[in-house]
Structure formats: structure tokens, C-alpha cells
Image (cartoon, rainbow, N blue to C red):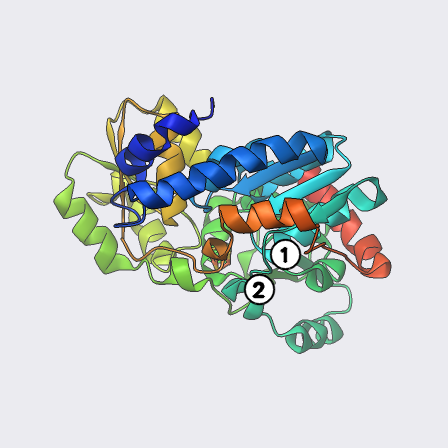
Amino acid sequence: MEKLRFEDWYDEFNRHAGDLYPGRYTREFVDELIAAGRKVRDLVPRKRSLVVAHNYQFPELQESAAQVGDSLGLSRYVAAQDSPRVDFCGVWFMGETAKTIVGDRAKVYMPDRPGCSLVESIDYAKIVHWKRRNPDGIVISYVNTDAGTKAVSDYICTSRNAAKVLDHAARRNPGKRILFLPDKFLGSVSIAQSSVADPTLIDLYDGCCHVHAKIGETALEEAFDRRPDAELLIHPECGCAAHCMSKVMQGNSPYQRAFFLSTEGMIRHAQASPAKEFIVGTELGMVYRLRREIPGKTFHPVSAEATCEYMKMNTLGKLLASLENDEIEVTVDPEIAGKAQLAIDRMLTIQ
Ligand code: SF4
């Protein structure tokens, strides 16, 4: 996607994101952003940096990044480049994943140290306990986990390939128990989408992301009522996922207009669909990206509350400070990185 010119930031941010972040893009604030954006643009080649931004970042960070995407897309992109420096605008575990992938080849910096409620829902002792009870069991972790959890995992998946990773792991390890962690909503949707022969062998960890858990059945029903012609693009981490999936599978109205998709899947689906209007069931930053990349169609957030305060800790001013001062460098213990690497490699290869 072609990046916006600085002189268009004020109009375009208000056009595509004025309703997502009410009152944010005043003329004065956009002027400050433009000044920071120009400095970032000058510094990036001097620092030989590759700036990448997750879909949930503010518009000004998306416009300043060489690549915008989901965890898997950004991991693949970083893996394919040979830049000696990566500035990663996302949450901490994403920076850790990028650092594990690039190893000594590149330094990874982040504008801040944002955590993640999903990662914080993981109790490492519970994983150890499960492994003791199931010594030959298989652990599948969602990419939204810290490096320590990845290191004890056999496979890492993303929302894009979770069902395929489940299929792959079950086929390769017949009869063995599988622990899927940490997101129970993604886990239940992935089991339904997979062709695993015996789902009773899969244990779902009881974790969730607070942003997506808030998107419940009522929000969906209200969105369908407000937009009777719209399709619903729903992220499988949402709190309504299990309920919504059973309605989708039964073909209940209006759920035949609901599609479970990763954020990259949302882009592809919206481009290909004959529908002109969509309700977006994930974090607000994704609505900006959809509006920018698919200008002929209309996108509505399912909820104005769906904002991740962790992701939004990153700002353009902090990215500039990071480029100027090289402050927040991501490091991963080499032993943990070595153990996590195999599971990450599998994630990058299972399509
Ligand atoms: S939306 Fe925020 S809290 Fe939820 S999984 Fe993503 S980074 Fe973590």
C-alpha cells in the first residue's frame, strides 16, 4: 500500500480514523506528528532500520512502517529481510519473536515495553503441571506468548494457521494429548475448523485477551441489527467466538454473514467479497488499515471500546526517540531463544 504524503495526514487521518479515535487528530497534534514523521523518515535509512508495525498500531505508525501486518506476516517479513536493525511497533512478545528469528544478524528495538493481557494470563506452573501429567503430550502455543512459553512449546501457531497447526500436530502425534494455549476462544474455533479426529484429546488453556473477550454476543447482535447488509469479519479470539461459531455452522440467520478470520484474512476476504459493507470484530487499528487498503468499501468497528491500551503505548514520538537514542533493545536469553526457534520455524512453514 502506498504511504500517505505528510501533507495529507490531517485530512486522511480524520477521514479514516476520526471516529475510531475521537478528538485525537486536531490540526495542532497532526502538525506535531508530521514533524516527528519527517525526522523518522530521515533517520530510518541512516540507522539502516526496518520499521514494522502491527495492525493495531495508531495510523501514524502504520504510515511510518515499511510493513504493516499481523504477528505471522511481520515475522515472515522480518525473516526475509537482511536489515541490521528492526524497529518493531507492537507488543513485547512480538519483539521477542522478531529477535529470536533474526538472532545475531540484527538488533531489535521497540518504542516502549508494552505487555499483553493474553500473555499475562499464562501461569507457567500450570504448563509444567500439564507436562508432568502428559510426558509425551504436545504443547501448541499461540504466537501471543512470551519467549519462555514458546521455549516449552512443540508448535507455535497464529490465528491464521491455528487449525492447520492442530491438524498437523494431531496427524504427526496420533493418540497423544495436546495442550492448546493460552486463548480458549481461538482454541475452540480452531478445533471446530480443524479435521482433528478426536477433539477430546485437546486440552484448552483457560486464557483470553481482554480486548477481544469484551466483544460478546450482544455486540454482534446489535451490529447485525444496525447494518443489515453488512458482512461480519470476526477474529477468533473474540469472547463470542464459540457461540458465534456454532451459529455459523448451523447456518443461522444472520450468522451466514459472519466469517472467522485472522486480520490478514480480513483484508483478503473484504477484497474478494461482493459485499460493500463490513463490521470489523477486532481491535480498532485494523479498521484503519482496511479503510486505507480497500477504499471502495465501508468498514465499521463492531465496538468503539475495542482498543488495546498495550498496543497504543507505542507512539510516533517514542519511535523517533528509539531511533535517536537506541534505548529499548529487545534481548532474548540465547538458551530460551534456541528452544523457541524450532517451534517458531514450524510456525513459519505451516501455511
Ligand atoms: S489485543 Fe492487546 S491484549 Fe489482546 S492479544 Fe493483542 S496485544 Fe494482547
Quadrant of the image occupied by residue 101: top right
**Would you call the spot at circle 2 few (<14 residues within 10 Å), some (14-19), or many (20 or more)?**
many
- The residue under the point 20% across, 48% down is 223
Residue 344 lies left or right of residue 225; in this view the side is right
Mark 1 highlights which residue? Answer: 93
Q: Residue at x 37, y 22 (%)?
A: 272
- The front one of 325 and 119 is 325
* Ligand 1 has an atom within 8 Å of the beta carbon of the residue at disc 1: no
Q: Name the residue at 86% across, 60% down.
A: 335
Disc nearer the start of the sequence (1/2): 1
Left or right placement of residue 152 versus residue 238 in this view: right
| 295 relative to 20, above or below | above
Is there CB contact under 8 Å for labels 1 and 2? Answer: yes
On the image, numbered disc 2 is attached to which residue?
Answer: 119
Ligand 1 closer than 8 Å to label 2 CB: yes
| Total marks placed | 2
> Picture coordinates of residue 109 (x, y %)?
68, 49
**As shown in the figure, which amino acid type bears the numbered disc 2?**
Val
Q: Is residue 308 above or below residue 74?
A: below
Distance from disc 1 to disc 2, alpha carbons, whole Å, reads 8 Å
Query: In the image, 307: left or right of 129?
Result: left
Q: Which quarter of the figure is the C terminus placed in?
A: top right
- Residue 286's label in the rendered image is none
Residue 152 image offset from top left, x and y in percent: 75, 62
Q: Nearer the viewer, residue 11 or 237?
A: 11
Q: Secondary structure at mark 2?
A: helix
Name the quadrant containing residue 142: bottom right
Q: Can residue 351 be spotted in the picture?
A: no
- The residue positioned 36% from the left and 45% from the top of the image is 29
Q: Amino acid at mark 1?
A: Phe
